[in-house]
Amino acid sequence: MIVTIFRSRLHPDARADYDPTAARMSELARKMPGYVSHKVFTAEDGERVTIVEFADMESHRAWGDHPEHRAAQRQGRAEFYSEYKLQVCEIVRESRKKAD
């Protein structure tokens, strides 16, 4: 499994344009072959963390190369984010406990 960790901060005035774009990207990602899940968390200081899981590197790359996603990435760098950090990781080990 491939996990992408995307940490970011929005420009204060970007929220109105960002939200519909983020909703569209969520919709598209869910339809991609190999998509597993994604979640977004926002810290009290405004930092946002998005965790995205794809089954394998091929499906992860396909998402990265999707034309609408590419356009959203360019818009994000130019208009939405004051800062960001992107990490792509391959799961080496996983353990879990499911709720009863």
Image (cartoon, rainbow, N blue to C red):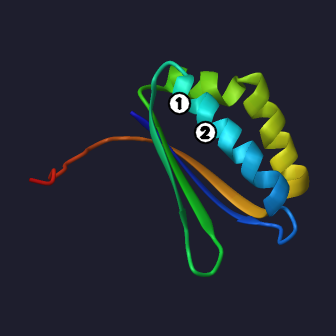
Q: Name the residue under label 1.
A: 30
Q: Where is residue 61 in the image (x, y as percent from the top left)?
A: 60, 25
Residue type marked 1: Arg
Q: Which of 34 and 90 is in front in this view?
A: 34
Q: Is residue 5 above or below residue 33?
A: below
Packing grade of label 2 (10 A; few <14, some 14-19, many >=20) is some
- How far is disc 1 from disc 2 in space, using C-alphas? 6 Å
Q: Residue 2 carries which label?
A: none
Residues at marks 1 and 2 touching, judged by CB atoms closer than 8 Å: yes
User: Which residue occupies 86% across, 45% down?
Assistant: 75
Secondary element at tag 2: helix
Q: Where is residue 57 in the image (x, y as percent from the top left)?
A: 50, 26
Q: In which quarter of the image is the N terminus?
A: top left
Packing grade of label 1 (10 A; few <14, some 14-19, many >=20) is few
Q: Mark 2 points at which residue?
A: 26
Q: In which quarter of the image is residue 48?
A: bottom right
Q: In which quarter of the image is residue 66?
A: top right
Q: How many labels does the image show?
A: 2
Q: Position of residue 46 (x, y in %)?
A: 65, 75
